[in-house]
Image: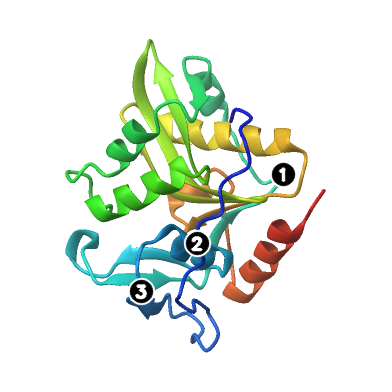
Amino acid sequence: MTASAEPVEPAPTRWHLTTDGADPHDDLVGVGADLAPGTILAAYRAGIFPMGVGPGGSGPIGWWSPDPRGVLLPDDLHVSRSLRRSLRSFQITTDTAFDEVVAGCADPSRRGAWITPQIVAAYRTLHDLGWARSVEVWREGELVGGLYGLQIGGLFAAESKFHRVTDASKAAVVGLVRHLEERGRPWLVDVQWSTDHLASLGVREVRRRDYLELLRAVLHDRS
């Protein structure tokens, strides 16, 4: 990702967002609040993220902290031989087509679609403030995959990814890790829930309490 000015800190939230009191293995830890920039940032800093609890991600807003949590840690990325071959045909950029990447992720025809216009608007605002980032994967000038999420200190909270050709979303993950490695500081990629697809890239599951410890370390590190 290209160098940029420090993100702009928005007004603080009026809501208290916490996992305190959440039962183990209970992923949904709250309902309500709002999608103001300060609310969303406070949530991620507390190990929580928003997603509507209604059909297709509709309201009310749910606040989630999966237990276990899917994470990708330094040195865990696995790039298969076939993916290495695919990478040669892709061009990977960052923060050049944020809206297009979000639109690809939010395509309502996708199975399990949950990204509503309200979520799109909220993360666009966070992008304008310097918090929401995107990784784009191109082939012959065409956007064929990508991912977007929030970058807070050493945390990259990956919200969603998409692909239009084989291996394009995996290539976006590789591009993201390369960016984080270049920064030269401890990092953590949060993928929320692990899947077989993500596990093939090296994603592992950790207990919520362990995730919160990892999160604190990368948010507070100043190296």
- Residue at mark 1 to residue at mark 3: CA–CA distance: 37 Å
Q: What is the residue that sits farthest to the right in this orientation? A: 223
- Residue at mark 1 to residue at mark 2: CA–CA distance: 36 Å
Q: Amino acid under label 2? A: Ala
Q: Is residue 216 left or right of residue 71?
A: right
Task: Please tell me in which quadrant of the rendered image residue 29 appears.
Answer: bottom left
Residue 18, position in %: x, y? 52, 78
Residue 135, position in %: x, y? 48, 33
Mark carried by residue 11: 2
Q: Is residue 112 visible?
A: no
**Image marks 1 and 2: residues in contact by CB distance under 8 Å:** no
Q: Nearer the viewer, mark 1 or mark 2?
A: 2
Look at mark 3 in the image and give the residue it sits on: 33
Q: Amino acid under label 3? A: Ala
Residue 217, position in %: x, y? 73, 62
Q: Residues within 10 Å of mark 1 (few under 14, many from 20)?
A: few
Q: Secondary structure at mark 2?
A: loop
Q: What is the residue that sits farthest to the top in this orientation? A: 140
Mark carried by residue 75: 1
- Name the quadrant of the N terminus: top right
Q: Work out whether residue 5 or residue 211 is closer to the camera in this orientation and state it.
A: 5
Q: Residues within 10 Å of mark 2 (few under 14, many from 20)?
A: few
Sequence-wise, the earlier of marks 1 and 3 is 3
Sequence-wise, the earlier of marks 3 and 2 is 2
Q: Residues within 10 Å of mark 3 (few under 14, many from 20)?
A: some
Give the residue drawn at x 50%, y 73%.
67
